[in-house]
Image (cartoon, coloured by chain):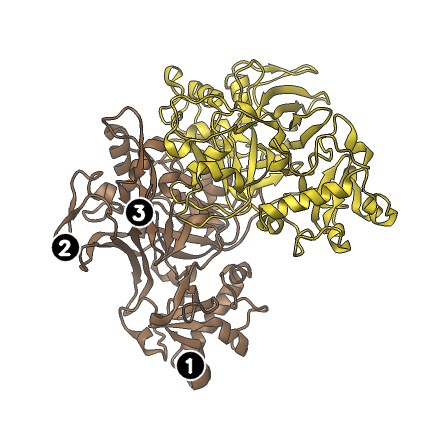
Chain colours: A yellow, B brown
Amino acid sequence: MTTIGPQPDWRSWVESANSADTHFPIQNLPYGVFSPEPGASPRIGVAIGDFVLDLSELEAEGLLWCGKKVFDHSTLNPFITLGRAAWRDARQRIAQLLRDSEPALRDNVMLRERCLVPSTRVQMHLPVQIPGYTDFYSSKEHATNVGKLFRDPDNALLPNWLEMPIAYNGRASSVVVSGTPVQRPNGQMKLPDQQRPVFGACRKLDLELEMGFIVGAQTPLGTPIPCDQAQEYVFGMVLLNDWSARDLQAWEYVPLGPFNAKTFATTISPWVVPFDALEPFRVAQPSQSPEPLAYLQQTGEHAFDIHLEAWLRPHEGHDETLLCQTNFRYLYWSIAQQLAHHTVSGCNVRVGDLMGSGTISGPEPGSLGSLLEITLNGREPLALKGGGQRGFIEDGDAIRLTGWCQGEGYRVGFGNCEGKVLAARSL
Amino acid sequence: MTTIGPQPDWRSWVESANSADTHFPIQNLPYGVFSPEPGASPRIGVAIGDFVLDLSELEAEGLLWCGKKVFDHSTLNPFITLGRAAWRDARQRIAQLLRDSEPALRDNVMLRERCLVPSTRVQMHLPVQIPGYTDFYSSKEHATNVGKLFRDPDNALLPNWLEMPIAYNGRASSVVVSGTPVQRPNGQMKLPDQQRPVFGACRKLDLELEMGFIVGAQTPLGTPIPCDQAQEYVFGMVLLNDWSARDLQAWEYVPLGPFNAKTFATTISPWVVPFDALEPFRVAQPSQSPEPLAYLQQTGEHAFDIHLEAWLRPHEGHDETLLCQTNFRYLYWSIAQQLAHHTVSGCNVRVGDLMGSGTISGPEPGSLGSLLEITLNGREPLALKGGGQRGFIEDGDAIRLTGWCQGEGYRVGFGNCEGKVLAARSL
């Protein structure tokens, strides 16, 4: 397989990018929107080792040029709109500038000083203006576990699930960047011992460990994306925490699906890993039976080997507890199948659309991507590392998702997707 | 009650605005985005009688000024963002300029020539850039009818329905303006005599007669809109046809709600009627039992007396058949309650958000807002005026929604919300 852009054996003159456990070696080069210091105007950068490379400075210097100004912007959308050839050219050029053998930036002390900002100093922003957010439900293990808990244990997987990548429209307005505090929602819930619902703070606040991809091109209304072309419409990927209020959800979701249980916040990681950076980690997805209908059939390998973790840092201590270790490759439905299904009705997509994978639970012990599944809806609380236990998330707890692809001697990582839960607004 | 802006007895020097059955008298003044001729750049206008008044020309002339340039734009969003006081000032000023006693525009032949474009000549555009689209389900009659057909006839209304305005997130990308052809979607459907779903053109294409309101101000994440302040967040209203593929919907909607059955197209009328223009038609909404929870309680009258109609023009003839006559006042949940519920979790709203009412069916014969209900899921086809019958919509059929408030001697109307159905994309 040909790797596009930086090769596996490349090294950078940014020393911290060459360590075996950094998420941001020269093989990654994820895009984000950052302020070099809090309050400074947002612009576009790539993460490299312990630094952020300011692409707007390189652009102003003439060292990186895409045919128009796209990096002195507060969202990635203008850059993404340029299209795939431009993404590849830019990636190739940035990798070259960062390669250990290339002096242009390495030996220009003044410019390097302006362009390379320590990661500890920057403020990250939502990387993309998101016109639409769709959340899929593509893990068979998750759908089965939820079906057992919310519906019928004997028919947990609904008959439509194996035939199509089930999804719902999410709320784009409340997608926030990692680090943004998340307020526990208020809402209606139905308690088993009461006739009518009560209103109050959610009692079953949960995470959902997901990944999301960012759509890189628009389509006209009425024009489906064929499954075998779908990957060309993907710009890159992020980690995604689809915060969920399980008690609100159980009461509201029939018949139109989850609404207030999800719309209060969705957190994504600040760095969008280019789809091309994931190419070396492509693997086969789980076998599908029954064979999908023709429009969902694909050739080649469509999953990616991305190791994923979820951690909880409790309000009463500093020790994080590992909640889950799973892998993106467990997903039953591929990104290509998701996009093909989403558009087969004629629905159009737009640059910056966010498509969530759904909770990624795996077949192995310890690979469940939500507390709902881990604690069986709170019935079997999880012991925390520093003592104490959790059925669901408490005020002051912080949830951190992380993930990476393991290369030979390097990792293509996604950084962190974090959020701390604040108490509900008082009534 | 005080009427803000043009008074009921005002008349315009635009003669066609004074006829008793125009939708666009001086008491209305709805905003839209238009090109004075096909291909010309879009700008903002108001409908007045048989004309469109070009507000960008008035702005350039200095006759209408909101503190910044907002009318030479392809969406209403910059104007809406100015806020409620600015909407009222502009409305007052436009009404004054159009009033029969006011010479400034009336007697300036050159300017009038430039500003007043015959409606027959203009091309209308989507009036608003829509960051988010939510569709409610607020007609008790509709929810009951659908429950009978899709679920259990004996427990048609689900227990949560009477406790909250149920809603789902729609797809904003495929909201189109009246006049845009609508392609029949392809998708999966489950036929009763087959084990697995089939893929093909929707066989049960339906309309949903709805109205939508446009959100006029943004809120910060985490800050609910109280029920009694909710109306201040409403800019105006449109007609909305929530095209629905019933066979796709029946197969896909459990458990996450409708998706491909709805995402292929939603049509709205081009003219946004200002919320203030509806003020004289405020009436009490149906009584609510049980009494809503505290956050959904409101004082005063929260429904509007808006007469609504749906018509079908069949592909084989020119005679339109009346499908439905209903009224916005039948809705069980008010706009204020919808907004309060939508945001009570902390979900934020943004300028231009579109909130659909859900299908508006009434208690009377002939007041059902979808063919699903009218024909009992196609089992009892409707006879067309010119001969023939319909269970659902056929290729080449056009659906037209219209509606108005009846004042004394004038109508505040919404114009038309139309779409003609094209054959599905061939497979």
- Residue corresponding to mark 1: B113
Mark closer to the chain start, 2 or 3 = 3
Q: What element carries label 3?
A: loop
Left or right of residue B176: residue A95: right
Dot 1 surroundings within 10 Å: few (below 14), some, or many (20 or more)? few
Amino acid carrying label 3: it is Glu
Given residues A324 and B271, the one toward you in this image is A324
Dot 3 surroundings within 10 Å: few (below 14), some, or many (20 or more)? many
Given residues B62 and B404, the one toward you in this image is B62
- Residue corresponding to mark 3: B208
Residue A267: percent from left, percent from top: 60, 36
Mark 2 or mark 3, whichever is nearer to me: 2
Q: Are marks 3 and 1 in contact (CB under 8 Å)?
A: no
Q: Which residue shows up at 70% across the image and 28% down it?
A: A411
Chain containing mark 1 = B
Q: Which residue shows up at 35% across the image and 76% down it?
A: B11
Amino acid carrying label 2: it is Lys
Are labels 1 and 2 on one chain?
A: yes
- Residue corresponding to mark 2: B385
Residue A127: percent from left, percent from top: 63, 43
Q: How far apart are the two marked residues, 1 and 2, measured between alpha carbons?
A: 42 Å
